[in-house]
Image (spheres, rainbow, N blue to C red):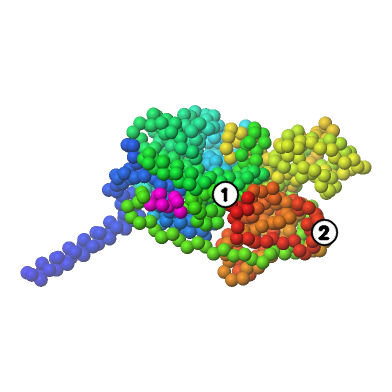
């Protein structure tokens, strides 16, 4: 009898184990079920946020995955966690994720799921800011340039051509991030509806449309809006918590939030820890003491905060935005997005970081994690330019040129599977029979180098609308190399951000006709064809500008971060092993380009430089042009 009871007990225990295993496997494959009894997520039902039913203060920081090499994501997030930040915020750049209509990229550097997962592993909550418009000092505020192929396009409205494109993008994006919501066991505790719409406010139906676009695709967490003070009264949407953006403390803004959202938590969604820089201006600095004093006061008022930026990173490639000083005279952003943030462009600690960590530590019951060690830095031997190729010689490696009676803007060129040209340069050539006054009619976007029979004769831009072409006999080729310096990322002129030649160019009051148009967008295919070409010229021949310059950087041992300084070079771009580090312009304030170690190889590294001019041709010494590499960042050189 005893033996039988013992056997029954064993079978019962075995049965419980089997049932438990079945339940475990089921809940693992169906996380919703496993979370049915989970505490509730972020709520805004009183003057304080609650998370899991307990009071919660968002101590946020912005780091954009698309501005930081993937190999450094963990380093930057660990440094943020060690500073006392508990929530990561990030934008999602539509124009990178859908570079051509219907072609989506969520891999490698753009692996958003991996970024969110990493944040969770490191103990950070996430507030996702999916746009579709993000501002961010990013080209066209993150909107794809191919939208502008539609001559009637009305961005950030319920214009069907725009909403159809948004729906298609969200159909790809939202299913990828929805499983990472808190309600599914993930780190996403809130999602932002659009961005700063109160400063745009062209369509009262637009924000409700974006809200529904998120909800209908499975977003369940708390929804937020984010507006500068001047847009608060126009940027809200029913049932969504409004937040404010500023750098200097705004009592009026908090009072407004209290008035429209009584007994709701206050949050500064963007507390601007520094500011962006523009080519030709000074480097912006916001003192650490002033920043931390305001952060302290915000927290004393029981508000939550997100530092924009905690770490800015870099506008690699051609993706920088532009700022409209006057209606039609934009200034482009520099390549560095250092932002004078608590972590520098290269991930270095700053005085702001140290002071901020001291303040945020008071809002944690446990001791903060230890501060991670800094990455090593190295100064390499100068790069010697070995070969060059003129612009004209490089045209054979571009897509087939377009013949057109009239100028065609970049976005409407029949390239990239009929998605147009997004970035880079466009060369317009036509035949002239005389000299005289060349007038851009203010149709150059943004800057054109002008050549007659391949000889440089002048520049057309927003300030210089006309100049005299030299006289000559017979037929001559007029060439305009037009640079897209970056589209506006903010303001009410987004619909007008087409680039290249956007209208007629006149010679002696007569519109020029019959153009041959070459697209030079510097995409990988073109760069690879160019680099592999056997038609490069020896450096001992006097180079032709504009042109492409080739050299090698030797790295002995394990690669380390460095900065490239380009003394004597005027304006251009630097590629290392096919990676576009961004634009350089001698006018500053930025004088160096950040070169992250993960993009270097042990041994020889290929350096390719499309450059427009030297500051002076007297700077050219055959075989001796060099790139010197420094430890310094933008902060030290302005």
Alpha-carbon neighbours of circle 1 within 10 Å: few (<14), some, or many (≥20)?
Answer: many
Residue 607 is labelled as none
Task: Decide whether residue 479 is among the magenta residues.
Answer: no
User: Percent position (x, y) of residue 404?
Assistant: 77, 40
The residue most toward the left is: 1
Query: Residue at the spot x=41%, y=44% of the render?
Result: 296
On the rendered structure, is 606 left or right of 18? right
Q: Give coordinates of residue 26: x percent, y percent.
A: 31, 55
Image quarter of residue 244: top left
Q: Which residue is mark 1?
A: 337
The residues colored magenta run: 354-361
Query: On the image, which quarter does residue 259 sit in?
Result: top left
Identify whether 359 is placed above or below 500. Answer: below
Look at the magenta stretch and give its main secondary structure: helix
Among the two numbered marks 1 and 2 on one chain, the one whose residue lies closer to the N terminus: 1
Q: CA distance from mark 1 to mark 2?
A: 36 Å
> Which numbered disc covers residue 542?
2
Which quarter of the figure is the N terminus placed in? bottom left
């Amino acid at each position: 009898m005893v033996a039988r009871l013992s056997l029954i007990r064993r079978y019962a225990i075995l049965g419980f184990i089997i049932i438990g295993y079945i339940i475990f496997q089921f809940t693992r494959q169906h996380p919703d079920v496993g979370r049915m009894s989970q505490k509730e997520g972020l709520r805004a039902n009183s003057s304080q946020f609650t998370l899991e039913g307990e009071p919660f203060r968002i101590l946020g920081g912005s780091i954009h995955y698309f501005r930081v090499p993937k190999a450094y994501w963990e380093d930057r997030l660990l440094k943020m966690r060690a500073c006392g930040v508990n929530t990561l915020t990030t934008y999602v750049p539509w124009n990178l994720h859908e570079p051509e209509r219907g072609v989506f990229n969520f891999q490698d550097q753009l692996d958003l799921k991996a970024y969110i997962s990493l944040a969770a592993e490191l103990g950070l909550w996430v507030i996702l800011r999916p746009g579709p418009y993000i501002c961010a000092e990013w080209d066209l505020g993150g909107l794809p340039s191919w939208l502008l192929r539609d001559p009637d396009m009305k961005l950030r409205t319920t214009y069907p051509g725009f909403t159809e494109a948004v729906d298609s993008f969200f159909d790809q994006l939202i299913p990828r991030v929805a499983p990472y919501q808190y309600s599914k066991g993930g780190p996403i505790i809130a999602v932002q509806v659009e961005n700063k719409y109160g400063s745009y406010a062209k369509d009262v139906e637009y924000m409700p449309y974006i809200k529904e676009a998120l909800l209908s695709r499975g977003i369940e967490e708390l929804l937020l809006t984010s507006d500068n003070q001047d847009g608060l009264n126009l940027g809200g949407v029913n049932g969504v918590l409004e937040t404010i953006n500023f750098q200097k403390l705004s009592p009026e803004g908090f009072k407004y939030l209290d008035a429209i959202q009584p007994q709701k938590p206050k949050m500064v969604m963007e507390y601007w820890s520094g500011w962006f820089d523009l080519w030709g201006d000074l480097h912006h600095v916001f003192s650490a003491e002033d920043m931390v004093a305001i952060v302290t006061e915000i927290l004393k008022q029981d508000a939550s905060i997100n530092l924009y930026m905690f770490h800015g990173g870099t506008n690699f490639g051609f993706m920088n935005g532009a700022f409209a000083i006057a209606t039609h005279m934009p200034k482009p952003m520099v390549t560095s997005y250092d932002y004078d943030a608590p972590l520098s462009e290269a991930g270095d600690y700053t005085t702001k970081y140290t002071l901020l960590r001291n303040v945020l530590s008071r809002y944690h019951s446990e001791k903060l994690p230890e501060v991670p060690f800094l990455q090593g830095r190295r100064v390499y031997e100068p790069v010697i330019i070995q070969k060059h190729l003129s612009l004209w010689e490089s045209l054979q490696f571009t897509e087939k040129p377009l013949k057109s009676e009239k100028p065609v803007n970049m976005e409407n060129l029949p390239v990239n599977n009929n998605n147009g040209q997004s970035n880079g340069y466009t060369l317009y050539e036509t035949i002239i029979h005389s000299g005289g006054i060349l007038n851009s009619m203010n149709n150059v976007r943004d800057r054109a180098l002008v050549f007659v029979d391949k000889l440089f004769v002048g520049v057309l831009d927003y300030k210089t609308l006309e100049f005299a072409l030299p006289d000559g006999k017979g037929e001559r080729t007029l060439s305009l190399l037009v640079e897209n310096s970056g589209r506006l990322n903010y303001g009410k002129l987004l619909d007008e951000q087409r680039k290249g030649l956007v209208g007629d160019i006149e010679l002696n009051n007569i519109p020029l006709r019959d153009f041959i148009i070459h697209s030079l967008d510097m995409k990988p295919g073109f760069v690879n064809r160019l680099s592999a070409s056997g038609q490069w010229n020896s450096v001992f021949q006097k180079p032709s500008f504009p042109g492409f310059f080739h050299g090698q950087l030797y790295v002995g041992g394990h690669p380390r971060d460095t900065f490239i300084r380009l003394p004597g070079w005027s304006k251009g771009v630097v590629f290392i092993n096919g990676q576009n580090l961004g634009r350089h312009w001698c006018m500053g304030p930025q004088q160096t380009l950040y070169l992250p170690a993960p993009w270097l190889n042990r041994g020889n590294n290929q350096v390719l430089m499309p450059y427009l001019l030297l500051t002076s041709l007297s700077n050219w010494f055959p075989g001796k042009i060099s790139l010197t590499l420094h430890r310094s960042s933008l902060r030290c050189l302005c």
